[in-house]
Image (cartoon, grey):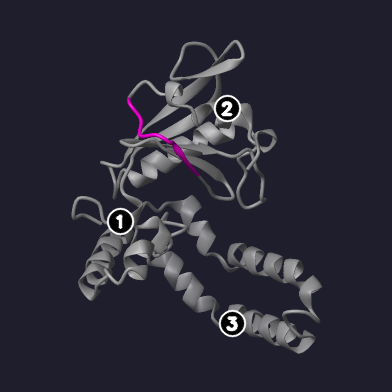
Amino acid sequence: MTQTTVPALIEQMMQPGFYPHPVKEPIRLMQTHVSYVFLTGDYAYKVKKPVNFGFLNFSTLEARQHFCLEEIQMNQANAPEIYLEVLPVTQTGNGFELNGAGQPVEYALKMREFPQDDLFICMFEQGRLTEAHMEELGRIVAKFHAKAQTNDYIRTFGEVSKIRQAFDENYQQTEKYIGGPQTREQFEETRQFTDAFFANWQNLFNSRIQNNWIRECHGDLHLRNICLWQDKI
């Protein structure tokens, strides 16, 4: 990565002097398609990228602040020791200041840093992830789902019309790959299967709504997003 490809704020957040606490040098920068994550030693900071993928829109400062607050609120249920606070980033002259005075130009989610080897994906690759870990994870996720919020708005996401939006979008986006990774026959058979499922199982979808199984859960729960920190998942 060259300096010309790094926003000025991100470049400054790579510098130890940006932080009001001691850091472990060099600061490590990790990127996902939606975030920059800075590993400083005791703490990690996440800054959301100003991107809009349709299903996810962080394109405005207000949206990034909102979703930082949503992220910390959601994760307080299962990882309160890790998710700490949302801090404003302000601009002072040509530089930036964390939690400074003035009008925020960005927001950073402050977290307790944990060893990357404690991620379940690393434990799995190293042969340290056990059946007991997975049983405990199952209990934790079940408890989380049992307490997860639901209301009239959340329940609408269980309606066939709402669920179909994602499926129909997938078919629209993958039709151009017919003749490459998939044949026309595979494409049509898959679409016919989902069309038939939605048509034949309307009662199942309705019962899930009526029984309050449509809840605000975790949208991205996989081994890279689970860690074992201080003997706790």
Report how far apart the C-alphas of labels 2 and 3 lie in the structure.
Answer: 48 Å
The mark found on residue 9 in the picture is 2
For mark 2, give the secondary structure: helix
Using the image as rendered, state which of residue 98 and residue 51 is in the foreground. 98
Q: How many numbered callouts?
A: 3
The amino acid at mark 3 is: Phe
Question: Disc 1 or 3, which lies upstream in sequence?
Answer: 1
In the rendered image of this protein, does residue 195 appear above or below residue 57?
Answer: below
The amino acid at mark 2 is: Leu
Report how far apart the C-alphas of labels 1 and 3 lie in the structure.
Answer: 40 Å
Q: Which residues are magenta?
A: 22-29
Looking at the image, which residue is at 70% across and 65% down?
169
In the rendered image of this protein, does residue 38 appear above or below residue 172?
Answer: above
Q: Is residue 8 visible?
A: yes
Tell me the mark number nearer the camera, choosing from 2 and 3: 2
Using the image as rendered, state which of residue 124 and residue 59 is in the foreground. 124
Image location (x, y in percent) of residue 145:
33, 60
Left or right relative to 13: residue 51: right
The mark found on residue 197 in the picture is 3
| Residue under numbered circle 1 | 118
Q: Is residue 212 visible?
A: no
Left or right relative to 207: residue 32: right
Residue 26 painted magenta: yes
Report how far apart the C-alphas of labels 1 and 2 lie in the structure.
Answer: 29 Å
**Neighbourhood count class around disc 2 (C-alpha, 10 Å): few under 14, some 14–19, many 20 upward:** some
Looking at the image, which residue is at 38% across and 45% down?
74
Question: Disc 2 or 3, which lies upstream in sequence?
Answer: 2
